[in-house]
Image: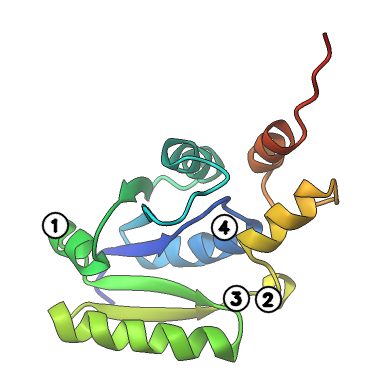
Amino acid sequence: MARTPSLYPGSFDPITNGHLDIIARASPLYDEVYVAVMIKTAKKGLFDIEEQVELIRETTAGYANVRAEAFHGLLVDFCRQRAIPTIVKGLRAVSDFDYELQMAQMNNGLTGVETLFIPTNPTYSFLSSSLVKEVAAWAGDVAHLVPPPVLKALNTRLHKTDRG
C-alpha cells in the first residue's frame, strides 16, 4: 500500500475520544494525517478555531505524523493544496453513511479524491461533540468521553465561577 497523506475533517468542537479513535486508527495507514478544523461562518462554536486547533494539537501530540490546521472552503481545495488523495471519515451509524456517501461521491467527482470510511469503535457509536457539550453544560460527567485537556477546557468555559 502506498503511504501518502490523508485528511480527517470536522468541526471538532470539541475533539472527543471518538475522534481520537479515528485518528489513532488512521495514523499508521498514512505518512501524514491532517486534522482540518473546518471554519463555518454561520455556526458559532463553544471554542474558537484557534482553541480547537490547539486542543487537537495537544491531544494528538503522541502522533508524530498528525497535523492540525484550520481551513475555510471546500475540502477538495484543502486536498489539492497539499496533494492529499484521501479523506478519512468515521461512521457511527447508517445515517452517517447516507450523508457521507453523497459527500464522498461529490468530492471524487470534483477532483478524484477518495474517501476512506472507518467504522467507529462501538464504545463511541453514540458520541458527538454536541452531546458532550450539552451534558457538560449541565455539569454531567464527560471525563470518559473526552481527553483530559478537553475536559479541563470544557470545565473552564462552561463552569466559570465568580469568586470575588
Please tell me in which quadrant of the rendered image residue 76 appears. bottom left
Q: Position of residue 16 (x, y in %)?
A: 62, 56
Residue 129 placement, left or right of 5: right
Q: Residue at x 64, y 57 (%)?
A: 17
Specify whether residue 85 is in view: yes
Sequence-first tag of 1 and 3: 1
Question: Secondary structure under badge 4?
Answer: helix
Residue depth check, mark 4 versus mark 2: number of the one nearer the observer: 2
Cα separation between marks 1 and 3: 28 Å
Sequence-first tag of 4 and 2: 4
Q: Position of residue 163 (x, y in %)?
A: 84, 14
According to the picture, the residue beneath numbered tag 2 turns out to be 125
Kind of residue indicated by mark 4: Leu
Q: Foreground: 135 or 114?
A: 135
Which quadrant of the rendered structure holds the N terminus?
bottom left
Q: Residue at x 74, y 36 (%)?
A: 155
Q: Is residue 52 above or below residue 125?
A: above
Residue 125 placement, left or right of 113: right
According to the picture, the residue beneath numbered tag 3 turns out to be 120
Cα separation between marks 4 and 3: 10 Å
